[in-house]
Amino acid sequence: MDFQVDLILFHPYDRWGFSKFSHSDDLVYLDYLLRRFSAYPNLWWSMANEYDLCFNKTLDEWYDIEGFIAAHDKYHHLLSNHHCIVPWDHSRKLTTHASFQTSRLERIAEKGRKYNKPILIDECCYEGDLPHMWGNITGQEMTARFWKCITQGAYCIHGETYLNDNETVFWSKGGTLKGSSIERIAFLKSIISEFNEPIEPLGYGLGQYPGYTNEELKKMLSDNNNPFLFTLLKLDQTERDRWLETQFEWAGHCGDKAYIWYFYQQCKSYVDICLPDNKIYDIEIIDTWEMTRETVFSGVSGYVRVRLPAKEYMVVVATKC
C-alpha cells in the first residue's frame, strides 16, 4: 500500500503484558522483532507511544532499548520515541528524528534549531467527534495544522476519530475515512512535491524570535533600530515566548527556489512580499480549503503586492522561474 510504517514497540495501553515485561524480556522481545521485521525497507522504529507513561521502565532501560535496536538493526532504520508529557531527549546520537505530541506548533522552528534533526509532529490532535480533547478538531483545523507544520519545515501525522455505529474509530481499527481533511492534505502534498527540496522556516516577522534568551535576543536585535522589538526584552523569556506565539505568522522556503506564506485564519485583502532582486518568480494564490490554485504574477522579483480575497486558509507561493 506504499506506506511508511512507524512501528510502535511499547505502549502503556496493552492488555497482554508487554508494557510490564522485565527488562531482560524486553530485549528478548526486541530481538525477535528486529529479526522478523528489519528487512522491510519501509519500516521505522518508534520505541513507544507515550513512553513516559510506561511506568515499569526506567530512563536507563529506555536508553538500553534504544542502544539494542541501533546495535541489532543492520539496516539502520529511522528511530525515535514518542511522549505524552515529558519529551524524549532527541539530541541523543542514536535518535534519528524528533517526535512530538503537541498542538503548540509555533515552537517547531525552535525545536529544529535545538536538535538539528527532522521534526515529526506525531500527534497534533485528530479530526473527529470524540468527547476527548485530542479527538474532535474540525477538518479545517486538521488541514491548517498540516500547513502550519509544513511551512515550518516539519512533518505532520494525520488521524481520524469519528465514531460510527459500532463505536469504533479509524484511528484505532481502520476502515473507511470519512473526514474532510484527507483530500486537502493530499492536495498539500501535491504542491510541496513539486519543490523536490525540504522546506525550512523563513524566520518571518515575529516568528523568528521565540526560544531565545535575553542575551541571545539582544545580540539578534543589536543592528535593528526598531524600538518595538526592544520592548520584548522587558518580558521574561516565558512571558515573551507566550506572547510571540499569539503573533506568529507561518512562512517557509526552499532556499531561493520557493517561498510559502500561509495566512491561517487571517482574512487579508493583500500582502506585500519581498523576493530576491536577482531572481524571477511566478506567484500563485492557493485556497487550501477549496483546493484551487491561481497564478497571479509571472516573472517578478523584489517587492510585490499580492491581492487576496480576504478569506481564511489562503496561501501565497512564489516559485523561481
Image (cartoon, helix red, strand yellow):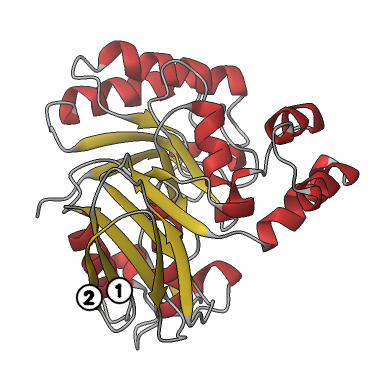
Q: Position of residue 241 (x, y in %)?
A: 74, 48
- Would you say 266 lies left or right of 175 here? right
* Mark sitting on residue 293: 2
Give the percent coordinates (x, y) of residue 281: 24, 56
Label 1 with label 2: CB-CB less than 8 Å = yes
* Residue 54 can be seen in this image: no
- Nearest the eye: 268 or 281: 281
The vertical placement of 81 against 206, above or below, is above
93 displayed left or right of 254 = right
In this rendered view, identify the residue nearer to me: 22 or 154.
154
Taking the image as shown, residue 285 lies to the left or right of residue 82, namely left
- Figure check: 316 above or below 267: above
Q: Nearer the viewer, residue 196 or 4?
A: 196
Q: Secondary structure at mark 2?
A: strand
Q: Could you tell me the amino acid type at mark 2?
A: Arg
Determine the residue positioned at 42% across, 24% down. 95
Category of crowding for the residue at label 1, using alpha-carbon neighbours closer than 10 angstroms: few (below 14), some (14–19), many (at least 20): many
Marker disc for residue 64: none
Secondary-structure class at tag 1: strand
Q: Which mark is residue 286?
A: 1
Residue that sits furthest to the top in the current view = 71
